[in-house]
Image: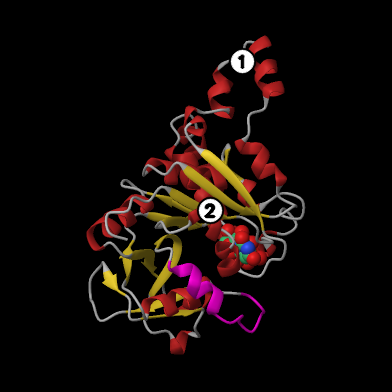
Amino acid sequence: MDNQKVKKAVLPVAGYGTRFLPATKATPKEMLPIIDKPLVQYAVEEAAQIGIKDIIFITSHTKESIEKHFNRSYELEDKLITSKKNTYLEKINPDLFKDLTFTFINQEEQLGLGHAISLAKNEIQDEPFAVLLPDDLFFSEPSCMSQLLNVYNQYKSSVIAVNKIDKANIHKYGVISSKDNASPYKIDFIVEKPHAKDAPSNIAVCGRYILSSNIFEHLENVKKDDSGEIQLTDAIQSLLEKEAVMACLYEGEKYDCGSKKGFVEATIKLALNDDSLKKDITSFIREIVE
Ligand code: UTP
């Protein structure tokens, strides 16, 4: 991975989004908006901001609205021009999209995150690449991807974002173990969704990664878990037995928008960060909690 630039990002968006049913019955979880922008666009912007040009979606036949969102809509553009609503043109077709290439790969069967990533092998070839799970939303300056890129540039190895989680919730995440007591940690061991009593630490994986392309051979060799899914965590464990994998403690705010709690919290937080909404929403919240 010596001096290889990270130019491509894989965004797996083929999951069922069960925790958000019935909203996700006909609408992809990744298209749910936080205020006025779908979750998936926040992830694309975060990837683009570190210089990534190629966005590879792992998608499914039920999620064509994601593809539509990143394609131009000439009909809507014409409509906005004739009705003199030109300010919206930048919103529906931002300059940022023009610099990016979007590729869509179909995951026919939802066999897990690891399986989804494995489908990007031919697109990625032998370059290091980023992975962003769009339902995890990160707000910080520098961004989460930018924090990972710093570690990648320093160590020239795979690096995954982690944060500290209380024991009561640790069973929902991949959890790492390391002899290092400060970030970046060299990972000794990683385990998917351990019972709280077996968790090797309180340091859990969150949805941003930079991975060596060697991950693909490990993804081919890991076995399905008890629920029939191929876990990315198992492939990372296999990878770190051969080469260093670092973990970067993310500094900033993180919202799990695949859960109702995280989604609502992110919406409130972004509303309060938005100058056009802040005043009204603050007084509304005061009014309803008093
Ligand atoms: P999650 O487990 O968080 O998403 O997967 P999910 O399966 O959609 O949600 P629930 O648990 O049923 O509520 C993490 C990421 O991996 C993608 C998801 O779209 C999400 O971005 N994924 C998961 C796939 O692309 N394919 C899969 O087979 C599984």
Residue 217 is one of the magenta-drawn residues:
yes
Dividing the image into 4 quarters, which one contains the N terminus? bottom left
Residue 245 spot, x, y in % from top left:
34, 71
Q: Amino acid at mark 2?
A: Glu
Q: Residues within 10 Å of mark 1 (few under 14, many from 20)?
A: few
- Find residue 229 and report its image quarter: bottom right
Q: Which residues are magenta?
A: 214-229
* Residue marked by disc 2: 123
Q: CA distance from mark 2 to mark 1?
A: 38 Å
Residue 175 spot, x, y in % from top left:
42, 76
Residue 235 spot, x, y in % from top left:
48, 75
Residue shown at 51%/46% (left/top)? 55
Image-based side of 159 in relation to 28, left or right: left
- Find residue 84 and report its image quarter: top right
Which of the two residues, 171 or 207, is positioned nearer the viewer here? 207
Which of the two residues, 28 or 108, is positioned nearer the viewer here? 108
Colouring convention used in this rendered image of the protein? secondary structure
Q: Secondary structure at mark 2?
A: helix
Residue shown at 37%/77% (left/top)? 240
Name which of mark 2 and mark 1 comes first in the sequence.
1
Q: Amino acid at mark 1?
A: Lys
* Residue marked by disc 1: 85
Label ID, residue 279: none
Q: Secondary structure at mark 1?
A: loop
